[in-house]
Image (cartoon, rainbow, N blue to C red):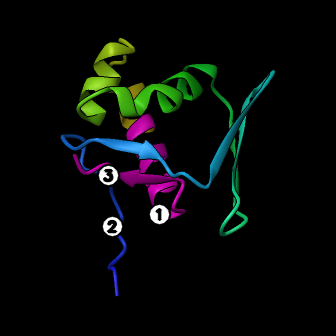
């Protein structure tokens, strides 16, 4: 049985789970997991942009650097990614 990771590792590469759809909305986006039926509201267009582009970077840190994010916003995004990981919206991308 696979043990659930509670916190993203910012030096690792992640991607949006294959069963997840990200639908842009005026407030940000709706993120829906077709497998477990979880729905997440993202209330930041910048966060949506980072999520949609996350797999093209070598790590969470690299994705946040590319977006030009600094503290305290950076810490909030890492917590959002961790929450999405716990909901199986994100997954570790093994190369």
Image: 80 above or below 4: above
Q: CA distance from mark 1 to mark 3?
A: 9 Å
Say whether disc 1 or disc 3 marks the residue closer to the N-terminus. Answer: 3
Q: Is residue 86 magenta?
A: yes
The single residue placed furthest to the bottom in the displayed view is 1
Residue count near mark 3 (Cα–Cα under 10 Å), binned few <14, some 14–19, many ≥20: many
From what the image shows, is residue 57 above or below residue 36? above
Q: Is residue 42 left or right of residue 82?
A: right
Q: Residues within 10 Å of mark 2 (few under 14, many from 20)?
A: few
Please name the residue shown 45% across and 56% down the image: 85
Tell me the residue at 27%/41% (across/down).
Answer: 13
> Label 1, label 2: how many angstroms apart (C-alpha)?
7 Å
Q: Which residue is mark 2?
A: 5
Where does label 1 land, which residue? Answer: 86
Q: Quadrant of residue 47?
A: top right
Observer-nearest of 5 and 78? 5
Cβ–Cβ under 8 Å for marks 1 and 2:
yes
Tag 2 secondary structure: loop
**Is 75 located above or below residue 73 in the figure?**
below
Image location of residue 80, percent across then percent down = 49, 44
Q: Is residue 89 rendered magenta in the image? A: yes
Describe residue 71's horizontal placement relative to residue 10 as left or right: right
Across and down, in percent, residue 78 comes to 38, 41
Please name the residue that numbered disc 3 is placed on.
Answer: 8
Pinpoint residue 3: horizontal percent, then vertical percent.
32, 79
SS under mark 1: helix
Viewer can see residue 72: no
Viewer-closest of 69 and 36: 36
Residue stretch in magenta:
77-95
In this picture, residue 35 sits left or right of residue 6: right
- Outermost residue on the front side: it is 95
């Amino acid at each position: 049985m696979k043990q659930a990771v509670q916190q993203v590792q910012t030096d690792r590469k992640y991607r949006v789970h294959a069963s997840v759809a990200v639908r842009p909305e005026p407030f940000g986006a709706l993120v829906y997991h077709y497998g477990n039926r979880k729905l997440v509201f993202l209330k930041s267009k910048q966060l949506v942009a980072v999520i949609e582009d996350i797999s093209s970077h070598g790590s969470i840190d690299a994705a946040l650097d590319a977006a030009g994010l600094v503290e305290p916003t950076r810490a909030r995004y890492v917590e959002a990614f961790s929450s999405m990981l716990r909901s199986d919206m994100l997954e570790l991308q093994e190369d």
